[in-house]
Amino acid sequence: MKKVFLSFAALALVASVYSCRETNEEKAEDNMEQMADDMEDAAEDTGDAMENAAEETGEAMDNAADEVEDEMEGNDDM
């Protein structure tokens, strides 16, 4: 009876360790997928910010060029 009980306990221990390992692997996979999604979102946000900054810089340069041109022609309101 003692051998049966010890065998059952050992089997239960092996089963619990094995099932925990699968859960940890699944959690790790889920975390990796979430991190990949977060990185993709961050990359898109960075790209959008860079595009907006480039557009704003271009507009500022155009405005500055127009101001210089107006001043050279004597049409500047200032």
Image (cartoon, rainbow, N blue to C red):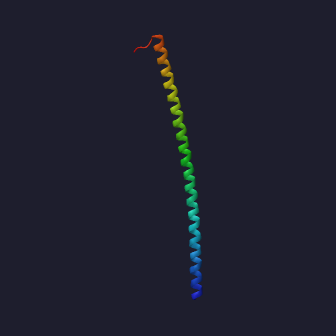
Identity of the residue drawn at 57% across and 83% down? 6
Quadrant where the C terminus lies?
top left
x, y percentage for residue 75? 45, 11
Identity of the residue drawn at 56% across and 72% down? 16
Identity of the residue drawn at 56% across and 68% down? 20
Q: Farthest residue toward the front?
A: 72
Q: Farthest residue toward the bottom?
A: 1
Q: Farthest residue toward the left?
A: 78
Vertical placement of residue 4 versus 20, above or below: below
**Count of numbered marks:** 0
Determine whether, in the image, residue 66 is placed left or right of residue 19. left
Tell me where residue 10 sits by quadrant: bottom right
Vertical placement of residue 54 versus 65, above or below: below
x, y percentage for residue 65? 50, 20
Vertical placement of residue 27 versus 67, above or below: below
Identity of the residue drawn at 58% across and 61% down? 26
Quadrant where the N terminus lies?
bottom right
Tell me where residue 41 sits by quadrant: top right
x, y percentage for residue 48? 53, 37
Tell me where residue 40 sits by quadrant: top right
Q: 51 or 61: which is nearer to us?
A: 61
